[in-house]
Amino acid sequence: MPDEQIKTEQGKAFERGEFPLHLVKKMAREGFLGAGLQTHGGAGINSVAYGLLMQELERGDSGIRSFVSVQNGLVIHPIDKFGTAEQKDKWLPGLINGDLIGCFGLTEPDYGSDPSGLKTRALKEGNAWVLNGSKMWITNADIADLFIIWAYLDEIMRGFVIEKGTPGMSVQKIGHKFSMRASDTGEIHLLDCRIPQENILPKTEGLGSVFSCLNQARYSIAWGVLGAAIACYQEALEHSKTRIIFNKPIGQFQLVQEKLVDMLTGITCGQLLALQLGRLMEEGSAEFSQISMAKRNNVRMALDTARKARDILGASGISVEYNSIRHMLNLESVSTYEGTDAVQTLILGKKITGFDAVRN
């Protein structure tokens, strides 16, 4: 699926405020879903190749990359890592071939950056689990068939799989967004939602299981935002060669050249950081703080690149006919989800100093 097709589709979808659902099956046929999995029909590519896939998808739009990284890192990954053989056989093939769409229910109305405080609870009643609580800002919620819901069970965080249509669960789409307009976002409400005993992911125990998933998502972001930055840089570069002012292309002006040099340098450094992280992921030696560093650095760089590109484009930079403003608005959300810039900073600060600035 060429980058140009994604850009065209997502530009239209962004303006409408709708996720292009018809692309899901196309992406599945290309092997994008379950890309890193070597079983159940997955493509089995390595971490660097997966990162490059994320980069190219986000050259089109953050929304399409977000869909793929949620399906892979936040739905397929926990089922594969924490599920039983029966659960894997039941759900993974459909998630990989595009018959099933999943979402990751962690964030709550009052708890985002501090998942340890979430209020959703699960109780055992006979041969079933009963869940109560609410989830907010959940990607894919309104189009999902499977819901990976995180809840406290006897004060231990556990993961549960809820299937679409289960009584006691309702989903409401979140609209009226200025960012990630081509991404489906919703809220989930659980009121005495009863699910079978076999729908718990048995190997999930505590926040470590949650962070295992978030690390997968943050890795996807570290690569993905490079694609958004590249798209903005290329658009600004082309514009600088054709926009004439004071009888010459604006690319001849020193201040414009400085912006382009900063953009290209930032992208190159970000790619090297992501490449090295990908190699560490393949070796199984990557630390979560290194993933946080890549997410923090590359999102900051991409946002700065998008803003510089919009400046070079001038008044054209606010038009939907150009891509930079769309990337800039999307990146505001990417900076927030899967751990805010501040959270990544504090993770790195603790790693460097040994002091926990949050808990102290």
Image (cartoon, rainbow, N blue to C red):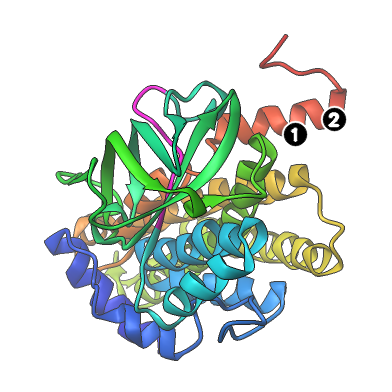
The residue to which callout 1 is attached is 348
Towards the viewer: 275 or 123:
123
**Which residue lies at the image location 68% right of the left edge and 66% below the top edge?**
271
Residue 168, position as x, y percentages in the image: 24, 40
Which segment is the magenta one? Answer: 103-110
**Which residue lies at the image location 38% right of the left edge and 47% below the top edge?**
195
Left or right: 29, with 113 as reference point: left
Left or right: 286, with 162 as reference point: right
As measured in the structure, the alpha-carbon distance from the residue carrying label 1 to the one carrying label 2 is 6 Å
Left or right: 36, with 179 as reference point: right
Residue 139 got which mark? none
**Which residue lies at the image location 52% right of the left edge and 60% below the top edge?**
225
Mark 1: amino acid: Leu
- Image quadrant in which the N terminus is located: bottom left
- For the question of whether residue 225 can be seen, the reply is yes
10 Å neighbourhood of mark 1: few (<14), some, or many (≥20)? many
Q: Main secondary structure of the magenta part?
A: loop
- Mark 1 vs 2: CB contact within 8 A: yes
Residue 31, position as x, y percentages in the image: 51, 86
Residue 234, position as x, y percentages in the image: 45, 73
Judge whether 61 appears above or below 125 on screen. Answer: below
10 Å neighbourhood of mark 2: few (<14), some, or many (≥20)? few
Which element type, helix, strand or loop, lies under badge 2? helix
The residue to which callout 2 is attached is 352
Judge whether 85 appears above or below 337 on screen. Answer: below
Towards the viewer: 216 or 245:
216
**Which residue lies at the image location 53% right of the left edge and 45% below the top edge?**
159
- The answer to if 357 sits in the magenta stretch is no
